[in-house]
Amino acid sequence: MNELVKRLSKKEHPVWANRPDKSVKALQERIDLNYVRILFEETGTEIGIKLDRDKCDFSKANFEKKTGKVHFEGALTLNYDKVKCIADISIRTMKGKGRLQLIENGAEYDRIINTENVV
């Protein structure tokens, strides 16, 4: 496993969502496209994740009032490692906590990456 992937997998880290435009409207658009950007603050690592809609939770967020939280899970390849990003983000601040998790099951990775946008 790559050293950066290992570091971001050990524990939760402070993250930002939806860079560079941190607006709620832009976040909704990114969710509709099934692709969200996450920045790990401590390392400056910015990733784009293909959302795993079955594992995401948007029910605790009120996008109109800009309150609540969203739970993202999505896949990507980082430094040749297939990983899942798991992050909980505040709608108001676009900040939260996130971590990576190595995906050892190639079928799971393929399922996420090859899923069509479903909006």
Image: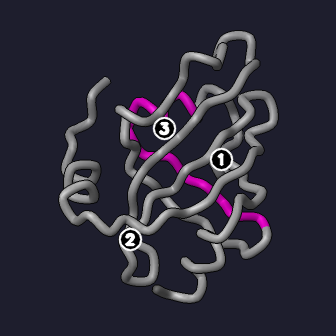
Crowd rating for badge 3 (residues with CA inside 10 Å; few <14, some 14–19, many 20+): some
Crowd rating for badge 1 (residues with CA inside 10 Å; few <14, some 14–19, many 20+): many
Would you name the residue on which mark 1 appears? 17
Q: Is residue 14 above or below residue 63?
A: below
Part of the protein shown in magenta: 27-41
Residue 16 vs residue 98, the one in the foreground: 98
Q: Is residue 70 above or below residue 94?
A: above
Would you name the residue on which mark 3 appears? 30
Query: Which residue corresponds to the image point at 74% horizontal and 11% vertical from the top-left?
Result: 65
Q: How much space separates mark 2 and mark 3, taking CA atoms?
A: 19 Å
Q: Amino acid at mark 1?
A: Ala
Would you name the residue on which mark 2 appears? 77
Q: Amino acid at mark 3?
A: Arg
Residue 21: which quarter of the image?
top right
Question: 84 left or right of 38?
Answer: left
Query: Which residue corresponds to the image point at 61% horizontal and 30% vertical from the top-left?
Result: 70
Question: 56 left or right of 22?
Answer: left
